[in-house]
Amino acid sequence: MSDPRWEAVDAYLHDALLPADPVLDATLADARAAGLPAIDVSPTQGALLQLLALAVGAERILEIGTLGGYSTIWLARALPPGGRLISLEIDPRHAEVARSNLRRAGLDDRAEVRVAPAADSLRALAASGAEPFDLVFIDADKPSNAGYFAAAMDLTRPGSIVVVDNVIRDGRVADAASTDPAVAGSRRVLEAIGAHPRVRATALQTVGLKGYDGLAIALVRS
Ligand code: SAH
Ligand code: DHB
Ligand code: MG
């Protein structure tokens, strides 16, 4: 599903709203040169993540799914001096590209990539009694989303924001009979979010450079 207007409007919004950014351009160029799939967030989505991080005054950010570090850079740039971002990635090749992109962006002092299955890293974070994260961005293997959301609820505090990417999938999320594990994963996480007593949440359908998809945004309450 696509419409040429979606990309044209994203290009227009990019020009109108977002400053030219050679570091982000180089990040995407290096990710493609290294053969990483073009599934990074779009520029306007990256800007939304950054705005959310700024709006909650995030000093600690957790990302699940690094790829080449494009969303990581948008998020890490919202951190104040002394802030910290941890990004979880299963693929060491992706992590290497991301680390190199973070170095060029001057963010390697505050953004760190941990290479392991995210479920393992999340368990280790919880066991270490890590300070709560102010924003969690869930964007890795979609079938695991409900597990990642549950882990995020244990690693946040009232006032934290949890964002889940790719929950609409061309509208297939509304198909209860779908056999696509990514769609089933999105449905499970949306239902877990909706049923959780300590979150206020919504999800929005989006169109643009990334086709027809969308994201869920949850605010943790006391
Ligand atoms: N957030 C990135 C895109 C992430 S793409 C951006 O917008 O720029 C999804 C990433 O999740 C891929 O790099 C993939 O290797 C990683 N991934 C997949 N399964 C994973 C798992 N079980 N644990 C950690 N990372 C995983
Ligand atoms: C896919 C994954 C993503 O995180 C995304 O934003 C778009 C597509 C995918 O696996 O197809
Ligand atoms: Mg995504």
Image (cartoon, grey):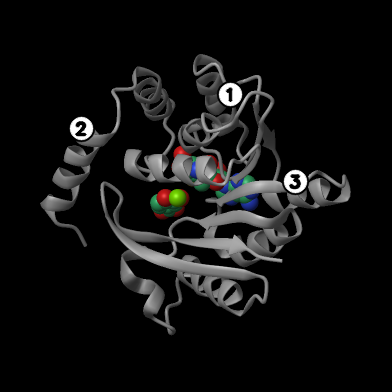
The amino acid type found where label 2 is placed reads Asp
Residue in the picture at 52% in, 68% down: 201
The amino acid type found where label 3 is placed reads Ser
Determine which residue is flagged by label 3: 121
The amino acid type found where label 1 is placed reads Arg
* Quadrant of the image occupied by residue 82: top right
User: Looking at mark 3, is its residue's CB closer than 8 Å to ligand 1?
Assistant: yes
Q: Are marks 3 and 2 in contact (CB under 8 Å)?
A: no
Q: Nearer the viewer, residue 80 or 74?
A: 80
Of badges 3 and 2, the one in the foreground is 2
Q: Nearer the viewer, residue 160 or 98?
A: 160
Q: Is residue 177 left or right of residue 133?
A: left
Q: Is residue 172 left or right of residue 179?
A: left
* Quadrant of the image occupied by residue 188: bottom right
Q: Earlier in the sequence, mark 3 or mark 2?
A: 2
Q: Secondary structure at mark 1?
A: helix
Q: Is residue 33 left or right of residue 82?
A: left
Determine which residue is flagged by label 2: 15
Q: Secondary structure at mark 2?
A: helix
